Image (cartoon, coloured by chain):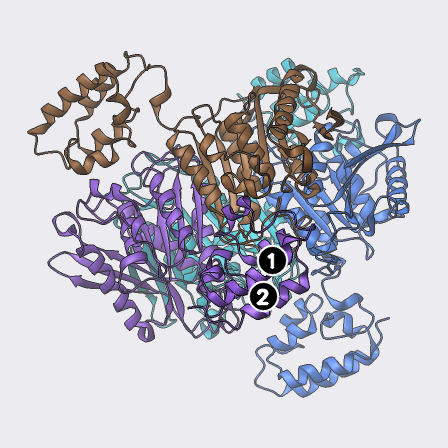
Chain colours: A cyan, B blue, C brown, D purple
Amino acid sequence: MRTEMIILNETRDVSLTAYLLDAGGEFKHMMKHPAVLILPGGGYQFCSAREADPVAMPYLAAGYHAFILRYSVREHAVWPNPLEDYDRAMALIRSKSEEWNIYEDKVAVIGFSAGGHLAAAAATMSKNRPDAAILGYAVTGEDVRACNPSAPDTNKAVDKDTCPCYLFSTRSDSVVHILNSIGFMQALAENNIAFESHIYAYGPHGFSTCDTSVQSADTIVCSRTPNWVPDSIGWLRDMLGEFGTNGMEPPVCKKYVTADHEAFLSIDCTFRHLMTNAAARAILEDLMSRMKGSTENAVPLDSAEMSIILNKMPLRELLAFSRVDRNIIEMIDGQLGIIPNN
Amino acid sequence: MRTEMIILNETRDVSLTAYLLDAGGEFKHMMKHPAVLILPGGGYQFCSAREADPVAMPYLAAGYHAFILRYSVREHAVWPNPLEDYDRAMALIRSKSEEWNIYEDKVAVIGFSAGGHLAAAAATMSKNRPDAAILGYAVTGEDVRACNPSAPDTNKAVDKDTCPCYLFSTRSDSVVHILNSIGFMQALAENNIAFESHIYAYGPHGFSTCDTSVQSADTIVCSRTPNWVPDSIGWLRDMLGEFGTNGMEPPVCKKYVTADHEAFLSIDCTFRHLMTNAAARAILEDLMSRMKGSTENAVPLDSAEMSIILNKMPLRELLAFSRVDRNIIEMIDGQLGIIPNN
Amino acid sequence: MRTEMIILNETRDVSLTAYLLDAGGEFKHMMKHPAVLILPGGGYQFCSAREADPVAMPYLAAGYHAFILRYSVREHAVWPNPLEDYDRAMALIRSKSEEWNIYEDKVAVIGFSAGGHLAAAAATMSKNRPDAAILGYAVTGEDVRACNPSAPDTNKAVDKDTCPCYLFSTRSDSVVHILNSIGFMQALAENNIAFESHIYAYGPHGFSTCDTSVQSADTIVCSRTPNWVPDSIGWLRDMLGEFGTNGMEPPVCKKYVTADHEAFLSIDCTFRHLMTNAAARAILEDLMSRMKGSTENAVPLDSAEMSIILNKMPLRELLAFSRVDRNIIEMIDGQLGIIPNN
Amino acid sequence: MRTEMIILNETRDVSLTAYLLDAGGEFKHMMKHPAVLILPGGGYQFCSAREADPVAMPYLAAGYHAFILRYSVREHAVWPNPLEDYDRAMALIRSKSEEWNIYEDKVAVIGFSAGGHLAAAAATMSKNRPDAAILGYAVTGEDVRACNPSAPDTNKAVDKDTCPCYLFSTRSDSVVHILNSIGFMQALAENNIAFESHIYAYGPHGFSTCDTSVQSADTIVCSRTPNWVPDSIGWLRDMLGEFGTNGMEPPVCKKYVTADHEAFLSIDCTFRHLMTNAAARAILEDLMSRMKGSTENAVPLDSAEMSIILNKMPLRELLAFSRVDRNIIEMIDGQLGIIPNN
């Protein structure tokens, strides 16, 4: 392993530490590595050492290069300084992908507490969006203003270009209220973005990896909490790809949950989305009119009850739910599949 | 183990199956057992066998008696029939606690999909509230009307008497949208109720325990998903107590997250809550006026920024955050501790 | 689930309890189940309830029917009574495979302490050998005579027909010394039989599943110990097959470790075994004479040092170790592959 | 984290790489760290990179400084060169304990394959014995001569000063036969040394951490295999101590399994050991003569059957087994406790 330390902004005391794994040679199936960029917490007053090196280690053990960004804090934390620091760091990492043997499309960001706010900002409003984001007991809502008055509410910034996210925290966190994470998840859900989330029953704020070497063994914290580390690594493998014999395999989980953002329409789009397209609407209305008289359907598609879930459920499930014949389902999928998704 | 099957309502085909563990004898530290009451899913059209016995087994292995309620479905599912079924079952279980060696204050409910809706209704609006509720890919919001038009939105029913809850589901569930679980968590958070939650990145609806004997090994489902079972058992031990040498030990996690619902005030109450009490408000206003001139405080308590988090954060954290001296914190706790919480 | 209780021998108070999982119907990929036959411990003085039902539950949860045999104890324990009880039980289970929906070639035995002795006897000297055996802190060596003077040393009975075995215990077990398990492993290794083994650093004898509902939470026992349960289930899936969409898939791990017991020879046989066959010996001697002059080989096959490992290592590894060309290796495999293994 | 690289022997190309964790500061409960010294494998022909850095990472994540020793290989591997390299490295580490913030009595060695042989030699025959040893698919028996003719059989070298050991390997390892590990365990058992051991059903030789970034995801290896890493960390915490609020707590598991090596005798010594001491023998013979007539004892202590286990079982268990009264047991313990163990 090689270590490098790069000053990104001397005035604001911003630096990037790089822990770079060996590639090639005996590691013949790993000519390159994916990477994580770690953003420690500290209320935008400092960058915690407890959320720096100890976080890097398990990802290094899992085959990820690890970078730690010490971003602008205290008087330098005025927005958008920290986000600029992030953008510069991510641009540098990707520009050095050849030299450092990095998959430039497989760089995740990991942030904790205020660093989690910065990670959420990176995921939602940066120039150089990460490929995945891990948010640990992150301040994602307007609460951030209590520690950094100029910082934005990232829950409101979630958009279609937001990367897949992994969130974790404890329910009883008395510093960053759980409504932060819930609000962020809601925004991700409304934007069709993939995510995973683990809210553990109880424990303090700022537990980092929750390894006993960081958070001592006598801490009152729920026994599932340390699982966030291996689970986040499993999630990264789902979202960025697993290590195969010849480099990395394709991801098994897509960024978008429904097909509402694919190039062409399909029955995996939601009913609501399909109805916004004139050609698709014609097909569905014809279907519904034919289904009207049928007594076989459990709940009619045009009922008041059904309208509740129409904007959430893929057409495939709605049709299965309404007991539409499998042949008709496939025919409709064929008809939709030639309509471009605009 | 003994098995019993009790008909609760012949007309509506409602039954309770009991799997009762041995107690006493060689199990000398277990004269009684806690219990789970399982509510299988099936869209209020049937009670799925896949969410009955296979769910009972891991809880039996963990020392919980297991009950399975086959509740009113199809034409009998009109509300409040299923909730009445639940209430009758829970009343029966508690009334037989001596005969069946049950801790009557340690009976959890576990429901899946539509059964998860019924479990959420049990937790929020039943006469015989459970002591804990496990909700698996549960329909908790108004979406329930798509499968049972007369059933209520349980997200809106969460109240102070709701028991601690454990929620799990997959983000990509295409039958029950993840916004159901998010809405329920939000309501729990707003009501100060303890919970744990695991949203796994991807997988189908209706995976039950996700053991390969129920959900075959070639299912496309995220590898963390089966963890919900042992994690829910760990959570039950946190909320209902662990098995000690002389019966069950006290729970390590409280039902309410802040002290806003305890008998007397304390600095573990939220600032917002304390300010609703005249005597407490006098103490806090005095404190704030004395802190005003101080330059030591990072963020003043009466600033616009601080007001954002005042209704969420316990006073203890706010004072620590504002760098108030430890002696003053303890003095204030003493003053608050004699004021009854009305 | 159905429960049955069958008296196998009234005089000796021998009974078989059957916990039978549902098959077919909603469980469409499980028309049949594999099974476990549990032999509780108790020093041949009684059959412990702590090693009966609590052991059945996790295997039921994993899709295995569970049977509990209460075998001959105290004055009835004189050998071979307990082994006869086992043989009768296993014969009955297999004869009822149609009625009970059992894969008759997928029935494992699980025994603890003295019941582990009986399980080891079943694996090594019964008429109706099990398909796999799980031995928990089992008395497998001559120590058994301290609790049952007429019982045999099973370590000496391991043979080529012994089934794959899974052993677990704690190093500090003060009742059954760890040399019992080590001796059994050695015998399995010498007979080319697959096994898995977990010896945990410390803990008492007789911990059963080590779930806190059986072995209370304040027991001084190493934290890895409860892993034997899920690990043994993973092992059963490796040895007996995983649950696929259309019934059970083939096992991924073979009963024999080297190919010394296959129908035809191959380079996956050990050198020692190949040299016992005249035709194979001719091929190998020719190879060795040609390799003699070569300076490319790290260690010559006929050196004194190499002879040490000749009886353990498959030829494939020896050739690779001696840096024999890949083409030559394949050629030799082809030559060996037509020689019957007598 | 700081990195240092120290040349230990230029001629033989021996070096020590140090990965040193931060101590003190925000890590206020960690003024010092325990450490691991890693000995990569490579058949004494090279030091494998796959068993160097990837092994260091999980222990760094767990709060252990990590050292990697590249020891004498090829023509320099003639014994005792590699062991001298080890001794020099361990002496250096302990001498720098102040500078590097190391608990000098908490330094474990970890070796793989041929490096596992060197680790076993360190544990059994070095001048500077480690405090614990982790042996991965290690060549511990005479087989080592196939790759290093001058290297000793470490199974025969196990003695009373051997440190506690943790062994892991796969049953089907076709390069290092499982009898190596079994032989080592047997020697540890005969010397009363604590150990833990995991033999996984199947997998290749040389899997290192078995993380997919080292051993690609399509490797045919048993799913439990990667558990050796976290389990070995749990074991180190049992043997060397857990991280508490004020530095490290005392170990929960002792080096010796019975009390045969303590300063004074007790009923936790084995019967055989007690009988070698004249004063203790007098006490026990008196007890046995008094017990002779008793009909309450299940198996008499002086029976032929009992003699089988007398040299293995602590007296405490023998007395309990023979149903000796608890008061008598305590009285005997008191009598033995004043007799020095010579």
Question: Which mark is on residue D289?
Answer: 1
Quarter of the C terminus of chain A within the rendering: top right
Left or right, residue B241 beside residue B152:
left
**Foreground of the two, D234 or A176:** D234
- Secondary structure, mark 1, is helix
**x%, y% of residue B241?**
72, 56
**Foreground of the two, A329 or C220:** C220
Residue that appears at 77% across and 20% down: A297
What amino acid does circle 1 point to?
A: Ser
Q: Chain of mark 1?
A: D
Toward which corner of the image does residue A277 lie, by quadrant? Answer: top right
Mark nearest the camera among 1 and 2 is 1
What amino acid does circle 2 point to?
A: Thr
Tell whether label 2 touches label 1 (CB within 8 Å).
no
Residue A126, compared with residue C190, is above or below; it is below
Quarter of the N terminus of chain A within the rendering: bottom left
Q: Is residue B136 visible?
A: no
**x%, y% of residue B293?**
62, 88
Question: Which mark is on residue A236?
Answer: none
Residue D161, compared with residue A186, is above or below; it is below
Residue that appears at 75% across and 61% down: B256
Q: Which residue is mark 2?
A: A219
Q: CA distance from mark 1 to mark 2?
A: 54 Å
Whether labels 1 and 2 share one chain: no
**Foreground of the two, D155 or C294:** D155
Q: Is residue C326 visible?
A: yes
**Foreground of the two, C182 or C146:** C146
Residue lying farthest to the left in this orientation:
C293
- Secondary structure, mark 2, is loop
